[in-house]
């Protein structure tokens, strides 16, 4: 029976052999980590989490699937560091575009594969500040940002076997190279003008560049001049590996032929699929996940997507959303202060604050010091209004703490003061966002103060007459035509509180109803009050026995 069974197995048809997979690339368990859309701090946190999950789950290799226009410099560098630190094999799959930071991330992986119609490159840093975007970064600022980026791509080139000067052409101008081939071995290298002249004894030709290099509108100006010599020196000092620029001294020029004029140095390098293969960046063309699995010989392929919380944080932490939330918080908190008790405006303010700090907390990226500053600022302002009326130490301290906290909420975790050019940009964005939101909220506060008695919904927030109050009816105070929204009293005037002042409400002075604020503590309805302060539209009163 055993012999018959063995014979039967031997005669059974077999599947065609699978394509051979290099042992160094073999991965039974393959994890695909997509990066789609703009790259920010939360993208970096997500990639770090997903990498650790892949490691813990037994993945043999990870593929970073890229379709991104790039993003924040600091986030890109954090992702590159994570990719170079992981114990897993890393492959970048450009599907479809890897612009700017996406190109830098692709270079950090151990190999690059591309979709049939992929694009990669154009990685010069640009200013995302709406005020400075048109004219681009200032030269000094641009050079400082370029230094860590070029240090990163040079390190990647030396680790992965790319030409370390060619990768710089993605980032900066002035990189002019020719591609030549060693006929006996088929080896291709990129050479500079000096190297070409030394090898061939003639000036290199400058015919049309074959590769579709170029910059999108506005980026070429942002790329600026080539790096200063001292910056290049700093780049070299940051390297752990020795230079890989080919030494062609002593080579026989007859064995070398010119392939093409690769980069002209006049524009940023941007390559399509064919060019990425020709220049040695793309190891293969991968049209879909099935082809990707076959390349690795993978049995299990899993896409590790960002979580719902990471996606939500990406939306909720955008500059515009945060700006709107800050404006809502300021206006709602103001309405709560001028309306007695704790009601709907207070809930709105708390909700806006929760949406401002909650989403980053979901991914462990909340700036808790900023929340403490905001809460502290609000408490100081309440102390100014309820305990020590007038604009003094508590009021000034509260405004400063509130402003600093809101800026911290916008820029996210990290030091408040800039420690890098990228952090400086974050701080400028945070300041601009809070100032614009504060100005918008200020306009809303002005109209609320002036017209809140006639605005829909807001007029419902003023206390009605309660049992024990001295009003003759239950109608809203705001509906009383005798009410005055502008100060019509003077210091020392005596009146009667017509609502309980907790601390805001109204008081009657010679037949006129005036919006007032209790200077200290709560004042019951029907109690005589004396005007102790008139500041703009704000009237502060004290119980007469304390006057």
Image: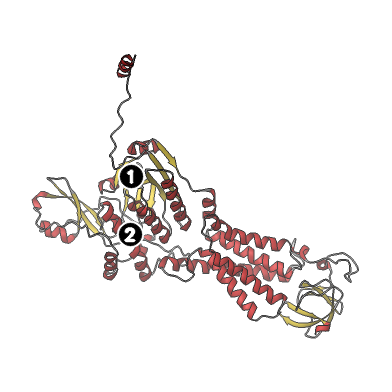
Residue that sits furthest to the front in the current view = 2
In front here: 450 or 253?
Answer: 253
Tell me the distance, in whole angstroms, between the alpha carbons under discs 1 and 2.
Answer: 20 Å
Could you say which is closer to the camera, residue 131 or residue 406?
406
In-image side of 216 versus 413 (left or right): left
**Which residue has dot 1 on it?**
113
Mark 2, Cα crowd under 10 Å, few <14 / some 14-19 / many 20+, is many
Q: Is residue 378 left or right of residue 501?
A: left
Q: Residue at x 87, y 70 (%)?
A: 469
Q: Give the answer, above or below, for where 288 lies relative to 371.
A: above
Q: Is residue 257 left or right of residue 4?
A: left
Q: Quadrant of the C terminus?
A: bottom right
| Left or right of 126 on screen, residue 485 | right
Observer able to see residue 164 = yes
Picture coordinates of residue 203, whole percent (x, y):
14, 59
Give the SS element for disc 1.
strand
Closest to the camera, between mark 1 and mark 2, is: 2
Q: Which residue is mark 2?
A: 152
| Mark closer to the chain start, 1 or 2 | 1
* Element type at mark 2: helix
Q: Position of residue 53 (x, y in %)?
A: 45, 47
Quadrant containing the N terminus is top left
- How packed mark 1 is, by other alpha carbons closer than 10 Å (few <14, some 14-19, many 20 or more), is many
Q: Where's residue 294, x and y in %?
A: 34, 36
């Amino acid at each position: 029976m055993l012999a018959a069974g063995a014979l039967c197995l031997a005669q059974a048809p077999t599947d065609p052999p699978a394509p051979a997979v290099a042992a160094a690339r073999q991965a039974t368990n393959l994890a695909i980590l997509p990066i789609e859309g703009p790259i920010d701090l939360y993208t970096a946190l997500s990639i770090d989490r997903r990498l650790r999950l892949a490691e813990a789950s037994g993945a043999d290799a990870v593929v970073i699937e890229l379709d991104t226009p790039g993003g924040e410099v600091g986030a890109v560098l954090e992702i590159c560091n994570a990719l170079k630190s992981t114990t897993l094999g890393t492959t970048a799959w450009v599907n479809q575009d890897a612009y700017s930071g996406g190109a830098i991330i692709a270079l950090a992986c151990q190999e690059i594969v591309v979709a049939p119609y992929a694009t990669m490159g154009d990685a010069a840093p640009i200013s995302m500040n709406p005020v400075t975007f048109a004219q681009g970064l200032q030269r000094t600022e641009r050079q400082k940002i370029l230094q860590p980026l070029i240090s990163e791509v040079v390190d990647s080139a030396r680790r992965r076997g790319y030409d370390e000067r060619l990768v710089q052409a993605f980032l900066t101008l002035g990189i002019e190279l020719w591609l030549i081939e060693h006929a006996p071995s088929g080896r291709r290298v990129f050479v500079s003008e000096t190297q070409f002249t030394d090898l061939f004894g003639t000036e290199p030709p400058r015919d049309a560049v074959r590769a579709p290099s170029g910059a999108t509108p506005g980026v070429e100006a942002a790329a600026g001049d080539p790096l200063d010599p001292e910056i290049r020196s700093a780049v070299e000092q940051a390297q752990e590996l020795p230079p890989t620029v080919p030494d062609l001294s002593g080579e026989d020029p007859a064995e070398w032929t010119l392939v093409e004029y690769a980069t002209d140095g006049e524009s940023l390098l941007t390559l399509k699929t064919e060019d990425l293969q020709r220049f040695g960046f793309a190891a293969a063309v991968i049209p879909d996940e099935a082809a990707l699995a076959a390349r690795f010989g993978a049995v299990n392929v899993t896409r590790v997507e960002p979580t719902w919380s990471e996606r939500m944080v990406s939306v909720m932490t955008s500059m515009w959303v945060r700006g709107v939330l800050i404006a809502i918080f300021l206006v709602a908190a103001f309405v709560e202060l001028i309306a007695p008790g704790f009601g709907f405006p207070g809930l709105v303010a708390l909700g806006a604050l929760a949406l401002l700090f909650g989403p980053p907390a979901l991914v462990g990226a909340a700036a808790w010091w900023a929340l403490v500053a905001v809460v502290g600022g609000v408490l100081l302002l309440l102390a100014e209004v309820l305990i020590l009326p007038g604009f003094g130490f508590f009021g000034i301290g509260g405004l400063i703490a509130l402003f600093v906290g809101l800026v911290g909420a916008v820029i996210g975790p990290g030091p408040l003061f800039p420690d890098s050019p990228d952090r400086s940009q974050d701080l400028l964005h945070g300041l601009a966002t809070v100032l614009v939101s504060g100005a918008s909220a200020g306009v809303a506060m002005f109209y609320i103060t002036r017209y809140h008695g006639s605005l829909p919904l807001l007029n419902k927030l003023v206390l009605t007459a309660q049992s024990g109050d001295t009003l003759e009816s239950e109608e809203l105070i705001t509906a009383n035509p005798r009410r005055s929204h502008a100060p019509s009293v003077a210091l020392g005037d005596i009146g009667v509180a017509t609502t309980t002042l907790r601390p805001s409400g109204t008081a009657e002075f010679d037949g006129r109803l005036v919006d007032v604020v209790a200077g200290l503590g709560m004042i019951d309805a029907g109690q005589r009050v004396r005007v102790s302060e008139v500041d703009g539209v704000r009237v502060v009163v004290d119980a007469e026995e304390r006057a």
